[in-house]
Amino acid sequence: MVSRVIPVEPFDLVIFGGTGDLARRKILPGLFRRFVAGQIEPEARIIGAARSELDDAGYRAFVGEAIADFGGNETRQKKKLKSFLDMLGYVTVDAKGDTGWEELAERVTDDRIRAFYFSVGPGLFGDLAKRLHKHGMADAQSRIVVEKPFGRDLESARDLNRGLAQHFDESQIYRIDHYLGKETVQNLMAVRFGNMLFEPLWNSQYVDHIQITVAETVGVGDRGGYYDKSGAMRDMVQNHMMQLLCLIAMEPPAKFDPDAVRDEKLKVIRALDPVEKDDLVRGQYEGDGTQPGYRNQVENRDSTTESFVALKLHISNWRWAGTPFYLRTGKRLRERASEIAVVFKDTPHSIFGPEAGNHRNILTIKLQPNEGIELGVTIKEPGPGGMRLVDVPLDMTFAEALGPEEADFPDAYERLIMDVIRGNQTLFMRGDEVEAAWAWTDPIIAGWQDRGDVPLAYTSGSSGPDDALMLMHRDGRRWREIKA
Ligand code: NAD
């Protein structure tokens, strides 16, 4: 069974920062894959807009190379590639000056959906919005897509929101969090709200705790300059992990509609308690002989920026009072693995006696490397050994359950860009959500800055500092093993 792809209506998409790393690795190859899948029709137009001096032909050559490098299997479709490249154009534009704006305004069509992707640093968001307005491109047909980081604290996020709101309505602003574009993240909503089985158990009466892990094996690499000013809390927790937390903890929205979903997510963030200092562990990786340590990869050799953070959270509402949420994320960890685990409570009484051991149902939502959902259930160990119990996974790894074609779903960026064209904001962050997440994050960061906390060193390839293990052990719980 192969799902039918419904083409989106022809559109104009302008990619500011169209020669940048994100455009090259994700946006352009993703658009090409949607074109090959038949979702984008040849009448659509994609215009790169950046500072580099290029013409249309030069940009097509640039994009051809990007697709060869990052396009995946679809790159073999030479005819399609040529038709795709024919849809591309380029205008040299300066976000902070007048260069290129009139030409750009002439190139985009009045009677179509117009999307402007701000794939540039946040310092340029306000300038771009202002100039789009000045040159008549900020009308009702237009929408803008903005990348992370959306600010570095509440004040800067408010400034960004204000700058955009001067020229665009909230319904025209699409703030990207690519985690929300992942198939499994959406499946989380389908599993929760499309089945009778889970929702009655989805509360503190039946759920012991929830763990969210986003583990990377890479270090900061050549992004040290950016990362050292940000750290794991700003780079991962405030946005991606907060979004995952919201989807797992929110109340059922009345309908699957952008504002209904986002209203419920916002309530979760607003119900978060402040984090106590003892419920927070920060770490920084050390070199391991073959790979340099964090401080050797950033300019400031005494940097106290965290490359790892673990924390315990409480959501103060009826559903979750008493169920802790444990979050951890870090670089240079043992494996690249991201998952959410909903750990249910023990059965109230074991009829099998103490020798049967402790068994718990765990629902695991795996985000990477392989997306899928797994439910651990307890059954009798097969064989003549008596009533011995064993936990086995009911595995819903998509590739196995649905067949390779069905599981070959679009990358998060592809899906999100198509949602922009379709005008569906469900998987994008609303301005008030982002501000609420910063309002919760800021005091945590201010707390460790005021105390002068220094992150704990951890060995590359480990599962982070030992104190992160203690965060769970002292509650009689333990982290799930980080494994791909
Ligand atoms: P980059 O430095 O590789 O590219 C920046 C682009 O902006 C270039 O095309 C450059 O020409 C253009 N630009 C810079 N100043 C300009 C100006 N005054 N006028 C017009 N164009 C200008 O950056 P990137 O890695 O592609 O990142 C773009 C944005 O996406 C950033 O906000 C970044 O934080 C975000 N982001 C990037 C990644 C990634 O994997 N690269 C991932 C998530 C978010």
Image (tube, rainbow, N blue to C red):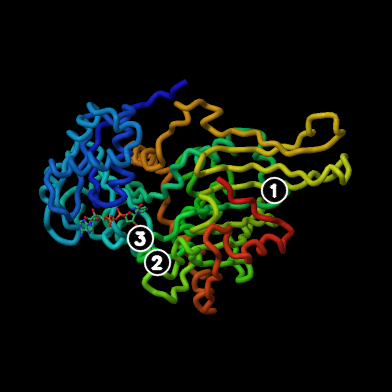
**Quarter of the figure with the C terminus:** top right
Residue placed at 40% from the left, 43% from the top?
Answer: 425
Question: Which comes before the other along the chain, label 3 or label 2?
Answer: 3
| Quadrant of ligand 1 in image | bottom left
Give the left or right position of residue 94, taking residue 178 as reference.
left
SS for dot 1: strand
At 29% across and 35% down in the image, what residue appears?
32
Q: Which numbered tag is attached to residue 222?
A: 3
Image height of 479 relative to 31, above or below: below
The answer to whether the residue bearing label 1 lies less than 8 angstroms from the nearest atom of ligand 1 is: no
Q: Amino acid at mark 1?
A: Val
| Whether residue 412 is situated above or below residue 166 in the rendered picture | above
Q: State how far apart marks 3 and 2 are (Cα).
A: 8 Å
- Amino acid under label 2? Gln
Mark nearer the viewer, 1 or 3: 3
**Which residue is more in the foreground, 3 or 397?**
397
What element does badge 2 sit on?
Answer: loop
Q: Residue 207 — which label? A: 1
Residue 217 screen position, x and y as percent: 49, 54
Q: CA gap, disc 2 to disc 1?
A: 41 Å
In the rendered image, which quarter is residue 479 located in?
bottom right
The disc, 2 or 1, on the residue closer to the chain's N-terminal end is: 1
Q: Which residue is mark 2?
A: 297
